[in-house]
Amino acid sequence: MDEVTTILVAGFVSELKLKLDRVYKLCSHPAESGNYHELILASVLSNFLTKRFSVKTGFIYPSKYSSHSDNHSGQIDIMIIDENVANAYIFKEGDFAIVRAEAVVVVIEVKTRNINGKNLKNALGKLNKVKTLNDITEIRSILFVYEDLCITKKSLNIYGNKDVFNQTAPDLLVNLDNPHCYIKHYGGQKIAYDVVELVDENYKETGQLAIMIELIMYYCSHNSYGEYLGTRNNERFKVIKTIEL
């Protein structure tokens, strides 16, 4: 990113971290703080993205060309929708929407606590299902967790059919109490996650949020099949290790 964009992202990231921390300390109930975390993240993204993209919560129905035309997603915490797509909405009321898959660029599942084991499987399952709904372009998926996310090869290989998971695995895993992010990439026939941290003094303890914002910007400007290729060639990104599935 250029210097102006770096300063802009740093400001949004600092604002986001302060608000998330404030809610976390004031709300002891995980469900309540989780709901507010969704609202805060959605609000910051709405202010950051251009008017072409809107931020909603709701459900996703398959694209008209999908082989899964009789199916739809569970409720998605945050959907980033391309308003330029004709007939994107099946239903819309305020910040709630039911949309066609071809209009969805990014989905984010937000979790606060207790995201291991069964809860991790359910969260990944919801994101995995979304990726089967569009045969035209790829819907990017992000798992955003406030704390207690432990990612290992074992925790990612929780599905019996690994070939299916490889095709639909989330693109980005973010843990707010850990400076590292997990970014998916393809190594030959296999899926792997680079464990990445941001080497940039502008962010200090908010590097994982900056990576998420930067990737969302990239996804919104490159809405097609493929992966984010800048991770290993970006001097600001440091790959700590790689987890191969």
Image (cartoon, rainbow, N blue to C red):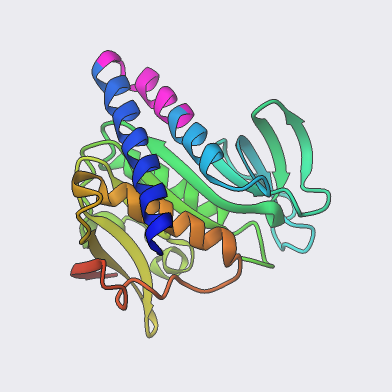
Whole-percent x and y of residue 128? 49, 54
Q: Nearer the viewer, residue 242 or 24?
A: 24
Residue under the image location 38 percent in, 26 percent down:
34
Question: In this view, which residue lies farthest toward the front?
Answer: 4
Is any part of residue 238 visible from this angle? yes
Whole-percent x and y of residue 5? 43, 56
- Compared with 108, 18 (above or below) is above
Q: How many numbered marks have been drawn onto this rendered protein structure?
A: 0
Q: Nearer the viewer, residue 152 or 36?
A: 36
Which image quarter is the N terminus in? bottom left
99 on left or right of 77: right
Residue under the image location 79 percent in, 40 percent down:
90
Is any part of residue 28 visible from this angle? no
137 on left or right of 238: right
Whole-percent x and y of residue 35? 44, 24
Q: Identify the image quadrant of residue 131.
A: bottom right
Residue under the image location 20 percent in, 58 percent down:
152
Q: Main secondary structure of the magenta part?
A: helix
- Compared with 191, 168 (above or below) is above
Magenta stretch holds residue 28: yes
Whole-percent x and y of residue 33? 35, 21
- Compared with 125, 42 (above or below) is above
Q: Nearer the viewer, residue 115 or 80?
A: 80
Question: In this view, which residue lies farthest toward the bottom?
Answer: 188
Question: In this view, which residue lies farthest toward the right?
Answer: 87
Which image quarter is the C terminus in? bottom left
Residue segment shown in magenta: 26-39
Magenta stretch holds residue 104: no
Residue under the image location 50 percent in, 57 percent down:
217
